[in-house]
Structures are given as structure tokens and as C-alpha cells.
Amino acid sequence: MSRPELQAPPEFYYGDTEAKKYTQNTRNQQIQADMTYRALELLNLPPEEPAYLLDIGCGSGLSGEILDDEGYIWAGVDIAPSMLEVALEREVEGDLFLQDIGQGFGFRPGSFDGAISISVLQWLLNAETSHPTSSPPHRLTRFFTTLHSALRNPSRAVFQFYPSSDDQIQLITSIAQKAGFGGGIVVDYPNSKKARKVFLCLYVGGGGAVQQQLPKGLEGEEEEDSKARFERRRDRERTKTKGGKRKSIKDKDWILKKKELYRKRGKEGVPRDSKYTARKRKPVF
Amino acid sequence: MVRLITHNLLACHVKDCNTNNFPLEFKDAQIELRETEFNPEFVRGIIPKLEWKALVDTARELGDTTLPLELPEMLDDDFLKNLHHVLLEIHVEDGVMICANCKHVYPISNGIPNMLLAEHEIG
Ligand SMILES: C[S@@+](CC[C@H](N)C(=O)[O-])C[C@H]1O[C@@H](n2cnc3c(N)ncnc32)[C@H](O)[C@@H]1O
Ligand SMILES: [Zn+2]
């Protein structure tokens, strides 16, 4: 089977059937969650500071659910209505937008404290959308330029993606640089066929790092648990800044409630029929 | 699920629409209130990013008059709670957002705004 991005435009490839299949596959859920945790680690947000994040190509919310779990407020954009529909059914907390990132963003300057994008960028290089406006370089330019301005200074944007050649990596990094970003490519487990992962780490104004060096890729053959590593590191950072006082951003009960909801849904294996079933509605006026 | 925090950061992105393109104006807005956990640090931290007047005006249009016209100097708990409510608990579920400048209409359905542009509107 060829890569999805070579088969059809994203909003057709991720139709109703594929959107459900993609989201319910537990192996896939685990992979996306793991890469999201790694992206959060590379994002290197200041500990103790609540953040407003952008999830680029948020799809059905597999990456966004991790942002919810970790207490971040976020907005997500995606071009596939069926994926967004599933995200609604799963009741993720982020604001969702139907948007083609190749058309650029309209967010005001400095809106976001960081951005992540999990398994999306390769789509901008390949299959055309059904709104063909121009070439991949044009689309990438609009995307990176408007993203750069939507991010606060300093901050970072971290993309996990599946490049199919070094030329593609070259094209993407050079356009991102022209748009004003620093940073570059981090490869995890470069020698493992199975675990190898490519991350594009982009910095606005130094990216908030003391040294402007790129983080190192993970080494070895064995994949480590990214969630455990992310949380360990974050707790360490918090201990440093707050003299041992560890305070979770979101209330424990709140997180537990959410987790239970996901677990229940996971067991049933199907999203609920309607996004309205569980909602408390209050009359407004 | 357009919350006012996001609406306050959103401008029109139609080609060459650069002035008077913020805030997008809600029309026929159907709103839903959904409780969410109060995090004073988050609310405090977001204030510098907000366009205050746009936020107050939009909240009032949607029927919430709890925010003062001027950003107060003292950010007490009551104020932060009101702001939390306006930013994160009012969800626009249906309706449209219209750009005051170019008149582009962004429809919202099931809480999701359609930001797709036509060929000739892309910058
Ligand atoms: C593999 S899914 C990843 C979804 C989500 N980030 C996750 O981790 O599960 C790739 C997503 O990218 C979206 N996508 C592809 N091209 C896009 C574009 N031009 N604009 C916005 N979203 C796009 C697709 O619709 C799809 O939901
Ligand atoms: Zn406009």
C-alpha cells in the first residue's frame, strides 16, 4: 500500500470510515500519544506557566486528548470534516476549526505559546487538496509565515512528520527559515527501522532555550515511554523553580473524570452516536 | 465550540484584508454554556494577549455584561472568575462570523467554524 498522502486529498482520504478506523485502532492511539508526549517534551514550555497551544492537523483529537490530560488549553485545525466530527464525539476540550493550513492562518500576532503537529506535514508535500491553489512551496510559505506570526516570542513549534526523502526535509526547513524560524530536525532512534521518528523543531526568537542548540535525538533501539519521561522531566523542572512545591495545573478529579470517560469509550470501541447525548445544557438568556 | 478566548485571537485571513478585519462579528449566534475548571494563573496569563475592548463588546453582544469596559488594575478573584467564564465557558455552537472589512462570512456549524477560503481569497 502506498503512503496515505499519495492516495487522495486529506479530506477525502480521512472520510467517515477511515476517520473512525484511524481513531479506534488502539495501536495507533498509542503511537500518536507517544509522539505527542515527545513533541511536548521538545516544546520545552516553561514549567508552572499555563499555556495556550495550537494543534496543527488535530484530526480526531488523539493528540489533543493528551493536551487535555496535561492541562493545556488549546485550539486545533484540520481540513477533514469527518476527523473533526469524531473529535466532537470524543468531546475533546480544544476549539476546533475546519481549515486548510496551506491557506495560512488568521490568528493575531503572538496568540499561541507553542504549537504541535503530529503526523501532518507530509500532507503539504504530497497529495493536493481539493482546493488546489498552488504548489507545495507556495502552500508551505503561507503556512510557515502565518504560523510564525501567530506564535509568541519566544516559543517553539514541534512537528512530527514522515518525510519520504532528504529533499523534502531540505525544502521544508529552508522555507521555515525564510519565514523567520530557527531550529531544525531532530531524529529519534535514527538507527532503528521501527522506532525512527523525525521531528522538526522550530524556534521563534531563540525558542526560549538558554542555549540555542537543538535538543538531541533519542538513541538506541528500544523505545522508551515518552509519557513517563515527559512527566518526570516536568516534575523535576517544577521542583527546581518552586522549591519542591509540586502543583498540578489541572485539578486531579478533573483529569480522572476525563480519563474515565476515555476508558469507557475505549471499551465500547465506538464513539457515541451524538455529541449531544451527554451534554448538560443550560438556557442562556 | 468557538470560545471567546479563541475568537479574540482570530482575525479575517482573506487576501489583502488587513485593516478593520478584527474582531469577526457574530451573527445568529447560538450559544451554550459549559462549565470548566477555574485556573486563575491561566486567566491572569492570557490577559496581555487580549484585545480588551473587542472582548467586552463581543461578550455583551452575546448577553454577558459582567466585564468592565476598562481592564481593572486590581485583578481580584471575582473579576478573574468572570473573565474565566467569558473566555472559556461561553461556546458559540452555530451561526456565522462576518468580517467587518471584506464581509467574508465564516459559517459555524456544530461549533466548528469553516475557515476555508475560495481560490481568489487566498493570500
Ligand atoms: C495522521 S492524521 C493525524 C491527526 C492527529 N494529529 C493525531 O495525532 O491523531 C493527519 C491529519 O492531518 C490532516 N491534514 C492533512 N492535510 C491538511 C491540511 N492541508 N490542513 C489541515 N489539516 C490537514 C488530516 O485531515 C488528518 O486529520
Ligand atoms: Zn476580511
Image (cartoon, coloured by chain):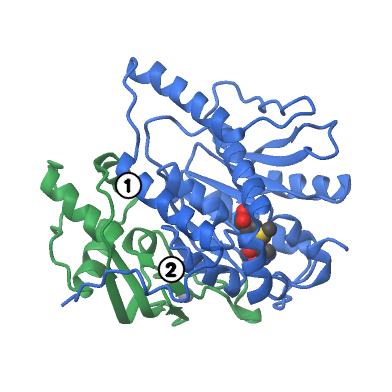
Chain colours: A blue, B green
Please state if B61 lies on the left or on the right of A24 as rendered. left
Viewer-proximal residue among B70 and B97: B97
Where residue A5 appears, as percent x and y from the top left, is 79, 64
Please state if A94 lies on the left or on the right of A203 as rendered. left
State how far apart marks 2 and 1 are (Cα): 41 Å
Label 1 packing within 10 angstroms: few (<14), some (14-19), many (20+): few
Label 2 packing within 10 angstroms: few (<14), some (14-19), many (20+): few
Please state if A50 lies on the left or on the right of A117 as rendered. left
Residue A180 visible to the viewer: no
User: Does dot 1 land on a helix, a strand or a loop?
Assistant: helix
Q: Residue at x 11, y 48 (%)?
A: B78
The residue identified by callout 2 is: B19
| Image position of A269 with respect to A227: above or below | below
- Looking at the rendered structure, the kind of residue marked 2 is Thr
Where residue A224 appears, as percent x and y from the top left, is 67, 30
Q: Residue at x 67, y 74 (%)?
A: A17
Viewer-proximal residue among A81 and A171: A81
What is the chain identity of the residue bearing mark 1?
Answer: A
Rendered-image quadrant of the C terminus of chain A: bottom left
Q: Residue at x 77, y 71 (%)?
A: A128
The residue identified by callout 1 is: A254
| Image position of A9 with respect to A184: above or below | below
Q: Residue at x 53, y 57 (%)?
A: A266
Viewer-proximal residue among A176 and A92: A92
Q: Quadrant of residue A223?
A: top right
- Looking at the rendered structure, the kind of residue marked 1 is Trp
Q: Quadrant of residue B86?
A: bottom left
Is disc 1's CB within 8 Å of ligand 1?
Answer: no
Do residues under tags 2 and 1 come within 8 Å of each other at their CB atoms?
no
Residue B21 visible to the viewer: yes
- Marks 2, 1 in one chain: no
